[in-house]
């Protein structure tokens, strides 16, 4: 996949004094970035004609069928492989996929019923699978050095390729292109196949799975390694929310295309085998000029004049969105939020627009009954410009009966942690800085090192974390959900409601969250989910003992 030659160099990081990145990129003010988070990155320009919006039908990813259902558990098999996919009409795009499709197949499961997914790696590079939002034992959480190697990638010396060097199965030693060494004696490396087991003892929610290989997460997701996983339970089913064809998963992602139809991406090493990182203009994040929903460019979907439940995921590497649903006469439809990252809210929250950062999920109900038959409802990105202002559209095709409802009370099982429950308060700064390789992104002044334990906490402890950012950073905690307590000393915003696992920090903002570290002991991560920031050092280790 060749990189596009055409580049829109939005050198707008807004880091405000952050070491060498300032000289490298040229910065706007943090105040300007707080209004325009989409500028945290640089945009590629596609090198081939792009389709008009609202011409391509919305695909809905197929639901994967288990290969086994015995013993009170479900077993699935997924092959990671290269495939040629038609994304732009009439254009073939080589991608890395789960089971040959983008997005990968959706897994639907029931709360408390364990799932094992056997992944087979037929790609030319190692991979790692992380179930984002899953309450998962550490062995299956997808730690970035727990590699799944393709067949034949293991040398007789028992060294395995990773990044620019080798990681020994016994010694766990990695040598990176920057010339510095890292040691991870706890890395678990598998060849060809690996089983990931998910107990799914958690609230019903929209989760997603994606590659999490150290240093190369961003380009791997960009090339197609992402899919949805929906957890359901009887209590949610009984609420009467829109269901069946009126429940739509929507994976939003931006991409750019090279002249030959391949995906453009500014990788320093297009093979994704040796040298991690992106070219200098893209150090703050890679933005595409094509908005995809479920792998289709600016799609349109025919709907009944009735309520629909939209399960929205921002699977973009770095792009933020501010979404609204606008009718043909300029009226904004209510977006009734019923769920967040980690499942149902206590009660609905009504928006007319809401921001969504990379890796965040919003579960909203939209009522199309007041739209004339034949009318078009556009989903607009208020943070976009030009072609990136449009996301998708719904065409109201017919009148229909609607027995769905939005209950005043949605869920009674949200945790009621209080500040007084916290056994400690921690502070973390997410900022640009110097790494061993040069420019990078740091947590607490340090780049990621798999051998260093950054935080140790006890199973069952409640903690308050205070997070501060230089530019926009969507911060994700593995294993646990959390509640947002405050933003810069003020009340959380309306879209902060519910239990989350990813929170969008704005420039200069201090956000307080509260969580309980329960579930499992072991080594987990917290990191920025701007995927380029993550690859350039903005991860840290969390040890639960």
Image (cartoon, rainbow, N blue to C red):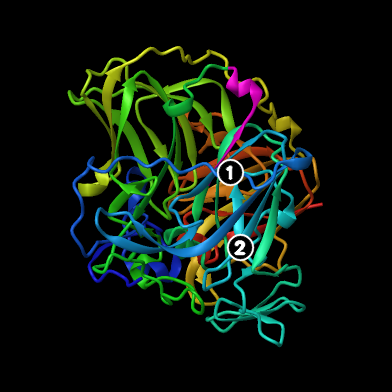
The residue at 79%/50% (across/down) is 521
Question: Answer yes or no: do the residues labelled 1 and 2 have beta carbons within 8 Å?
Answer: no
- The span picked out in magenta is 228-238
Q: Secondary structure at mark 1?
A: loop
Question: In the drawing, does residue 493 fall left or right of residue 119?
Answer: left
> What number is the disc on residue 242?
none
Give the crowd class for mark 2: few <14, some 14-19, many >=20 residues within 10 Å.
many
As displayed, is residue 524 above or below residue 252?
Answer: below
- In the rendering, which numbered label is found on residue 65? 1
Task: Residue 306: name its quadrant.
Answer: top left
**How far apart, in angstroms, are the residues tagged by discs 1 and 2?**
16 Å
Where residue 219 appears, as percent x and y from the top left, is 45, 64
* Residue occupying the point 49% across, 16% down: 406
**x, y percentage for residue 189?**
70, 70
Q: Mark 2: which secondary structure?
A: strand
State the image quarter where residue 522 is shown: bottom right
Q: Which residue is mark 2?
A: 120
Labels 1 and 2: the sequence-earlier one: 1
Instruction: Please state which of residues 374 and 142 is positioned toward the viewer in this rendering.
Output: 374
Q: How many residues crowd mark 1 within 10 Å: few (<14), some (14–19), many (20+)?
A: some
Could you tell me which residue is drawn at 20 percent across and 62 percent down?
A: 48
Q: Is 231 included in the stretch rendered in magenta? A: yes
Q: Is residue 478 magenta?
A: no
């Amino acid at each position: 996949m060749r990189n596009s030659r055409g580049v829109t160099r939005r050198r707008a990081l807004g880091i405000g004094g952050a070491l060498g990145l300032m000289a490298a990129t040229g910065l706007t003010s943090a105040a300007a970035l707080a209004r325009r988070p989409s500028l945290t990155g640089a945009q590629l320009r596609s090198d081939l004609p792009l389709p008009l919006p609202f011409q391509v039908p919305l695909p809905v990813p197929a639901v994967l069928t288990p290969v086994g259902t015995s013993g009170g558990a479900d077993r699935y098999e997924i092959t990671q492989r290269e495939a040629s996919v038609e994304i732009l009409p009439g254009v073939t795009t080589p991608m890395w996929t789960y089971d040959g499709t983008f997005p990968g197949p959706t897994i639907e499961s029931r709360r408390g019923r364990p799932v094992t997914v056997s992944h087979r790696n037929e790609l030319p590079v190692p991979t790692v699978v992380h179930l984002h939002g899953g309450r998962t034992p550490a062995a299956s959480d997808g730690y970035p050095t727990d590699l799944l190697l393709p067949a034949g990638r293991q040398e007789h010396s028992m060294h395995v390729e990773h990044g620019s060097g080798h990681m020994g199965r016994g010694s766990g030693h990695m040598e990176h292109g920057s010339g510095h060494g890292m040691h991870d004696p706890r890395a678990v490396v598998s060849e060809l196949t690996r089983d990931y087991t998910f107990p799914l003892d958690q609230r019903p929610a929209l989760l997603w799975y994606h590659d999490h290989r150290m240093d190369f997460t961003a380009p791997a997701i960009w090339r197609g390694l992402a899919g949805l996983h929906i957890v359901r339970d009887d209590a949610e089913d009984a609420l009467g929310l829109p269901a069946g064809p009126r429940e739509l998963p929507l994976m939003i992602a931006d991409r750019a295309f090279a002249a030959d139809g391949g995906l453009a991406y500014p990788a320093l090493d297009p093979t994704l085998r040796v040298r991690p990182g992106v070219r200098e203009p893209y150090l703050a994040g890679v933005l595409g000029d094509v908005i995809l929903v479920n792998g289709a460019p600016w799609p349109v979907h025919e709907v009944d004049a009735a309520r629909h439940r939209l399960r929205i995921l921002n699977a973009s590497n770095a792009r933020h969105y501010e979404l609204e649903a606008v009718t043909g006469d300029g009226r904004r439809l209510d977006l009734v939020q019923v769920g967040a990252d980690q499942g149902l809210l206590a009660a609905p929250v009504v928006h007319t627009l809401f921001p969504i950062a990379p890796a965040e999920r919003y579960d909203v109900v939209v009522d199309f009954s007041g739209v004339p038959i034949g009318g078009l409802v556009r989903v607009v990105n208020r943070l976009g410009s030009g072609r990136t202002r449009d996301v998708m559209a719904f065409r109201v095709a017919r009148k229909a009966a609607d027995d769905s409802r939005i209950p005043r009370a949605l869920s009674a099982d949200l945790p009621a942690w209080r500040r007084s429950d916290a056994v400690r308060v921690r502070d973390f700064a997410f900022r640009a800085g110097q790494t061993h390789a040069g420019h990078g992104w740091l947590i607490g002044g340090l780049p990621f090192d798999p051998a260093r334990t950054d935080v140790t906490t006890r199973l069952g402890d409640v903690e308050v974390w205070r997070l501060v950012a230089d530019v926009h950073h969507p911060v994700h905690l593995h294993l646990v959900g959390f509640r947002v307590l405050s933003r810069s000393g003020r009340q959380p915003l309306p879209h902060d409601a519910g239990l989350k696992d990813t929170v969008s920090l704005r420039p200069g903002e201090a956000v307080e969250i509260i969580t309980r570290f329960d579930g499992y002991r072991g080594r987990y991560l917290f990191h920025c989910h701007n995927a380029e920031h993550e690859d350039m050092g903005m991860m840290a280790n969390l040890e639960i003992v």
